Image (cartoon, coloured by chain):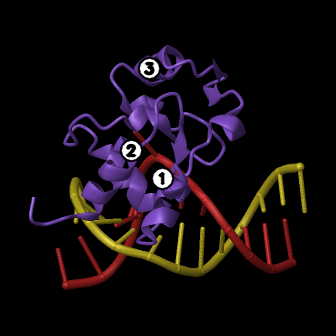
Chain colours: A purple, B red, C yellow
Amino acid sequence: MADESYFDLVYEVVRHVPYGRVTTYGAIADYLALGSARMVGWALNQCSSGDGVPAHRVVNRLGELSGRHHFNPPSLMQHLLEHEGIKIEEDKVRDFKQLFWHPQELDLE
DNA sequence: TGTTTGACCACGG
DNA sequence: GCCGTGGCCAAAC
């Protein structure tokens, strides 16, 4: 715990994602102002290591469930999002722009 | 120990 | 509006 890896920072941000909202890799990377969106993907790749990290709320900038294949089962990601009231169309978030949430909004919240 | 890939994004042509 | 390239950091081979 003493060592705050980049992964931990990503987990923290993802964990702060409000219910029924989604964020993107770039938004997290931009908020952390560290590494890059690729690292965010790597961090979530170890989502199994993370505890209670709603990785299903993290999608690419297009709102596509790019990482759904990394879930178990893959349809779990879509299922969780729909469970939160988020409509998924063609493995993409409907009204993604509206549901898009930026970590920076935490200060505004 | 160096190369390749990875749940990506932004910019330029 | 689509395609190619660079960048970023870390783990796996």
Which three-letter amino acid code belongs to the residue tagged 1?
Answer: Leu
Q: Secondary structure at mark 3?
A: helix
Chain containing mark 1: A
Q: CA distance from mark 1 to mark 3?
A: 23 Å
Identity of the amino acid at label 2?
Answer: His
- Relative to A93, is A105 above or below? below
Q: CA distance from mark 3 to mark 2?
A: 16 Å
Badge 1 and badge 2 in a common chain = yes
Q: Are marks 1 and 3 on the same chain?
A: yes
3 and 2 marks on the same chain:
yes
Q: Residue at x 53, y 44 (%)?
A: A23
- Tell me, yes or no, whether the two marked residues, 3 and 2, touch with CB atoms within 8 Å: no
* First in residue order: circle 3 vs circle 2: 2
Q: Position of residue A35 (x, y in %)?
A: 41, 71
Could you tell me which secondary element the residue under label 1 belongs to?
Answer: helix
Disc nearest the viewer among 1 and 2: 1
Q: Residues within 10 Å of mark 1 (few under 14, many from 20)?
A: few
The residue singled out by tag 1 in the image is: A106
Does label 1 or label 3 sit earlier along the sequence?
3
Image point (48%, 64%), residue name: A31
Question: Which mark, by number, is residue A80?
Answer: 3
Name the front one of labels 1 and 3. Answer: 1
Q: Nearer the viewer, residue A102 or A78?
A: A102
Amino acid type assigned to the residue bearing label 3 in the image: Leu
Q: Which residue is mark 2?
A: A16
Residue A71, quarter of the rendered image: top left
Q: Residue at x 44, y 41 (%)?
A: A17
Q: Chain of mark 3?
A: A
Q: Are marks 1 and 2 in contact (CB under 8 Å)?
A: yes
